């Protein structure tokens, strides 16, 4: 029998189902053995005293996405995937975004050109649907779903993206027929426009008013509506970037009614509040994202919902805009209204370390829940499980070795994205991903990049199996 190419020895392996001590044997990029005292491999890694989790799957991030306002995302597939890998992520799923009038197929081809040869870890694509014409819904979308693009995001706000309820129902109808997953950005667009107009007329344009223009009821109403549309169309939805208690209540109520509503939250709703938008001068723009961060009570509600299984997925929503940059947050200058600031904050590299330290380390969630939220469930949701998101015989050898005791003070200087700030500057974390392995290849180790840019492969997603998805069992 051929030797193992890699043996990971003596680690504490954490999966969605269990935490066990075992060795992992890897051949041709896949896990081929789990057990005690495996025979020596060509490469040996001693993981004694370390925690080994499946490589993270960040199923909501934005890389090199063309923007309609002239702003430019700071991370492409090179810097974005390198940054993700240093944070313990081995699969990213960013968005091929349709602008109105564009053919979906052309958008996907363009996005492949942007990704080709640049990724250091594996990647799949979601679609963003902003123009659901008969041609798109009748021809292009069904064909793309069959080709491995099995999930798409729709927006209930943003002038250049938003769909009305009828259009969302039409999209859900296709998703139902083809077995795809619809992700929904749930905020009420007319409420935001009305509030923004009033704030701007009163001269209240500083970054902190972004949060005032998008209060919780704006999200609550749209979340209720999205769940209702899912119920009527009998098609599952994933409510993305859920920010707090009011939306969580709607999701929990819909789940209790038996509606297939899945939910995602992100680090910004655990570690930032609206006060972070109220910094000196224009600095609050760094934390402008939508929905906005709320307050401490809402952070607590998000933690509780993570623990109790209301949430299935923990993503970064990495949307990289540089702060001191006329193509970034300051595209209209530092006196501009909040309404012109590109939305989004960076988070690919900090997503897993933040949840490991503040969730697992502080006893708020257990290790299995951590694995489900950061790897197993997102893989499952997009038809990639158990190739991704698992440590099992037959799975891709995507693993992260964590030093659970290492103390790290987060600074932007230590991160590998191309953004000029992190909203989490100065946070003290315990636990850090020391080694990231993708298909048996050590990609990052001890702070150094070890693998070749361009080795990352495109993944075709299968149609998801949400009926079998659990967040607590
Ligand atoms: N909100 C989004 O909907 N997308 C990108 C970032 C953000 O804040
Ligand atoms: Zn969104
Ligand atoms: Zn997003």
Image (cartoon, helix red, strand yellow):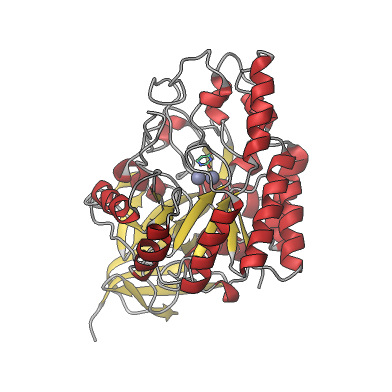
Q: Nearer the viewer, residue 420 or 249?
A: 249
Query: Residue 211's quadrant in the figure?
Result: top right
* Front residue of this view, candidates 398 and 140: 140
Residue 249 visible in the picture: yes
Q: Picture quarter containing residue 189?
A: top right
> Residue, x 63% and y 31% (percent of image)?
193
Q: Is residue 405 visible?
A: no
Front one among 370 and 332: 332
- Tell me where residue 456 appears, x and y as whole percent: 28, 57
- Position of the C terminus, as image quadrant, is bottom right
The residue sitting at the front extreme is 134
Q: Quadrant of the N terminus?
A: bottom left
Label tally:
0
Residue drawn at x 56%, y 30% is 287
Residue name at image x 32 percent, y 50 percent: 107
- Vertical comparison of 332 with 343: above or below: above
On screen, 417 above or below 401? above
Q: Position of residue 225 (x, y in %)?
A: 68, 53
Give the answer, above or below, for where 232 lies relative to 39: above
Q: Position of residue 318 (x, y in %)?
A: 47, 42
Residue 261: x %, y % from top left? 64, 63
């Amino acid at each position: 029998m051929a030797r193992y190419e890699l043996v990971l020895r003596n680690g504490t392996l954490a999966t969605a189902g269990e935490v066990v001590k075992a060795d992992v044997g890897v051949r041709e990029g896949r896990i081929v053995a789990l057990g005690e005292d495996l025979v020596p491999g060509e490469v040996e890694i001693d993981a004694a005293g370390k925690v080994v989790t499946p490589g993270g799957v960040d199923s909501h991030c934005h890389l090199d996405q063309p923007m309609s306002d002239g702003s430019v995302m700071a991370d492409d597939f090179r810097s974005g995937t390198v940054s993700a890998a240093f944070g313990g992520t081995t699969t990213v799923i960013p968005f091929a975004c349709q602008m109105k009038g564009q053919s979906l197929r052309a958008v996907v081809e363009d996005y492949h050109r942007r990704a080709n040869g640049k990724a250091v870890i594996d990647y799949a694509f979601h679609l963003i649907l902003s123009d659901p014409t008969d041609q798109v819904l009748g021809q292009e979308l069904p064909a793309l779903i069959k080709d491995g693009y099995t999930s798409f995001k729709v927006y209930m706000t943003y002038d250049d993206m938003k769909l009305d309820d009828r259009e969302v129902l039409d999209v859900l109808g296709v998703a139902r027929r083809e077995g795809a997953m619809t992700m929904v950005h749930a905020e009420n667009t007319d409420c935001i426009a009305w509030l923004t107009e009033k704030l701007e007329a009163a001269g209240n344009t500083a970054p902190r008013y972004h949060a005032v223009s998008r209060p919780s009821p704006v999200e609550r109403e749209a979340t209720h509506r999205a769940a209702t549309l899912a119920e009527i169309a009998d098609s599952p939805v994933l409510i993305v970037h859920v920010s707090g208690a009011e939306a969580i209540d709607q999701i929990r109520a819909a789940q209790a009614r038996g509606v297939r509503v899945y939910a995602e939250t992100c680090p910004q709703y655990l570690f930032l509040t609206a006060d972070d938008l109220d910094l000196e001068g224009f600095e609050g723009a760094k934390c402008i994202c939508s929905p906005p961060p709320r307050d401490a009570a809402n952070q607590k509600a998000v933690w509780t919902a993570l623990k109790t299984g209301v949430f299935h997925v923990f993503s970064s929503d990495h949307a990289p805009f540089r702060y001191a940059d006329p193509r970034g947050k300051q595209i209209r200058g530092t006196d501009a209204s909040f309404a012109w600031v590109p939305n989004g904050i960076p988070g690919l590299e900090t997503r897993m370390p933040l949840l490991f330290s503040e969730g697992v380390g502080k006893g708020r969630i257990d290790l299995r829940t951590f694995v489900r939220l950061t790897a197993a469930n997102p893989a499952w949701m997009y038809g990639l499980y158990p190739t991704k998101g698992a440590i099992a015989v037959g799975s891709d050898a995507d693993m992260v070795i964590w030093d659970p005791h290492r103390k790290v003070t987060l600074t932007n200087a230590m991160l590998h994205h191309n953004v000029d700030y992190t909203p989490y500057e100065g946070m003290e974390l315990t636990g850090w991903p020391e080694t990231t392995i993708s298909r048996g290849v050590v990609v990052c180790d001890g702070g150094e990049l070890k693998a070749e840019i361009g080795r990352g492969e495109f993944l075709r997603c299968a149609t998801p199996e949400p009926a079998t998805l659990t967040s607590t069992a």
